[in-house]
Structures are given as structure tokens and as C-alpha cells.
Amino acid sequence: MAVPPVRLHHVDAFTDIPFRGNPAAVCLLPEPRTPEWMQRVAQEMNLSETAFVTPSEDGFALRWFTPKVEVELCGHATLAAAHVLWECGARSTADTIRFQTTSGVLTAAATTDGITLDFPSLPEEAVPPPPGLVDALGVSPSYVGKSRYYLLVEVADERALRDLDPDMALLARLPAIGIIVTSRAEMPGVDFVSRFFGPAVGVEEDPVTGSAHCCLGPYWAKRLGKRTFTAFQASPRGGTLRVTTQGARVTLSGRAVTVFRGELLVGVPTGEPA
């Protein structure tokens, strides 16, 4: 049975420069598709996340898949989804977009900082370094914490962070779906820097990780005694975020640029097994 094509957009998020920031695929669906189908599309896209957007009674339903698994929270693909909905005229930039997700209602608004997302805060608690962490990173941490999803590791300085060359096989065995490494920034105008590794879910180094900043914001708020930060994720592609902690919420702001648009021509029809 043939299926109608669906629109697919490739967007670089947390940047306004093509081929920088974090690329996400955004798939606009007229109606839901099976998780198996979405996982296959995400595997085909082979990006850190592919977002699937479906109209709902109160905005849009939104799901995110890595090449290996569905995840509960993703910042850059949410920012990319909002960018696409405004760009294609599905919503006016005067409208706040509401996304229904496994992490509750998330919103996106057009602001002077680009696109501002309202996300849950995910603070960490101090834990002993798990076995294998030091060997995996090749550096001794000055702090280790654990949030709902991630391990958070602070290292001595930005140079130590940028010089990391982790053992991905060892990182994948650690008790977290991702490892955030962070330090104070030496870059002018930036408060803190980070890198993110998620080999357990098929993402060795994520270029710019919005959900990680739901943990980094509260962490650096305690360390620096302030609520609003400029953050830079020091991956090879790099990306900049504006982060503000607001009690149980964190706002993440950044820009996005569409790199290409196309049509997905094959798939599993709704309701049929993948």
C-alpha cells in the first residue's frame, strides 16, 4: 500500500550559521505513525535526534528519536520543530507553540534571543565517581553529580574540557544515558562551556544538547550565584545558548537555520506493523 509523502526538514539548531550547531530532522506528520516507523526514519536520518510533529487539540504532539531509541526530552530538536512550524506558516511567530510530550507540556516562543523554550529543570545531586568514569574520560573530575538522565562532570578548566578524547566504549557502560562535561569558560562573554557524550543511545558526541542545559543551568546557578547565563557547547560544530533558571523550570534560547527541505516518500501506513 502506497503512503503519501510527508515533509521533512533538516535544521541546524542553536546557531544561525549553516553547518554549525546541532542538526535535527523535523518530520511533519498529518497523523500519528507507529513508534517502529519513527525509529526507522530516525535511523535513516542518522542524526542525534529526529523530531516527529503531529497536530493535536492543544498545539502539537512531539516525539524524539535517536538512531537507536526514543528519548524523553530533547532541546535542539524542539527548537528546530518550532522553527519549522513558524517558517512553513503552520503557526504565526506571534503565537507561543505548545508541544505535548512525554516530559509534559513544553512551549516555544519567538523572542529577541531567537526561540525561547520553557523546559523542566533537572538538577543534579553529588555522587561518587562511578567505576570506569575516570578511565573513560582520561581526566580526574573536580565534581561528579547525577541528574534524572545524565552524569554531570566538572573538570578543572576549559582547556581540559576541549582536550578530552573519551573512550566511547567505556562511556557507554556508565549508569547514565549521557555524560555532560563542563567547566568555567575562558571565552569572553561566556559563563560556562560543556561537551556531551551519549554513546549508549547512539550519539557519540552531541554537537549542542539543550536537555543537558536543564541540568547545567541549576548547577552553575549554585556555583556562580546568578540565574541567567550565556553557555557554549564546545563540540567541533559548536553552539551557543542563553540559559535562565526559574525555579522548577529552565528557559533555553537560541537560533536555528534550515539547511534543506524534502519529502519522505516511503513508510509504513498508519496502523500497520512496521
Image: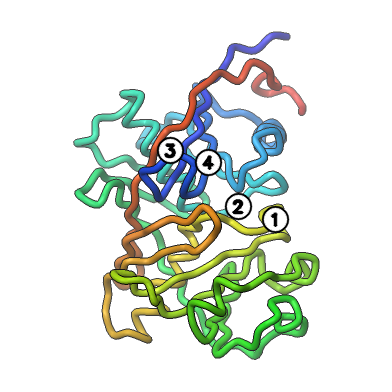
Q: Is residue 142 visible?
A: yes
Task: Name the amino acid type tagged 2.
Answer: Val
State the separation of the CA atoms marked 4 and 2.
14 Å
Mark toward the viewer: 3 or 4: 4
Quadrant position of the C terminus in the picture:
top right
Residue named by callout 2:
71
Which is in the foreground here, disc 2 or disc 3? 3
Type of the residue with mark 4: Ala
Residue position for label 4: 24
Label 1: which residue? 201
SS at badge 4: strand
Confirm or deny contact between disc 2 and disc 1 (CB under 8 A).
Answer: yes
How far separated are the C-alphas under marks 3 and 1?
A: 21 Å
Tell me the CA gap for discs 2 and 3.
16 Å
Label 2 vs 3, first from the N-terminus: 2
110 or 106, which lies in front?
110
Write down the residue under mark 3. Answer: 81
The residue under the point 48% across, 60% down is 211
Q: Residue at x 53, y 82 (%)?
A: 154
- Identify residue type, mark 1: Val
Tell me, for residue 271, which label it has, or none: none
Is 19 above or below relative to 143?
above
Q: Residues within 10 Å of mark 2 (few under 14, many from 20)?
A: some
Give the image location of residue 135, x and y in percent.
76, 81
Q: Does residue 245 appear anywhere in the picture?
A: no
Calculate the distance from the C-alpha at mark 1 to the C-alpha at mark 4.
16 Å
Is 134 on the left or on the right of 243, as rendered?
right
- The amino acid marked with disc number 3 is Ala
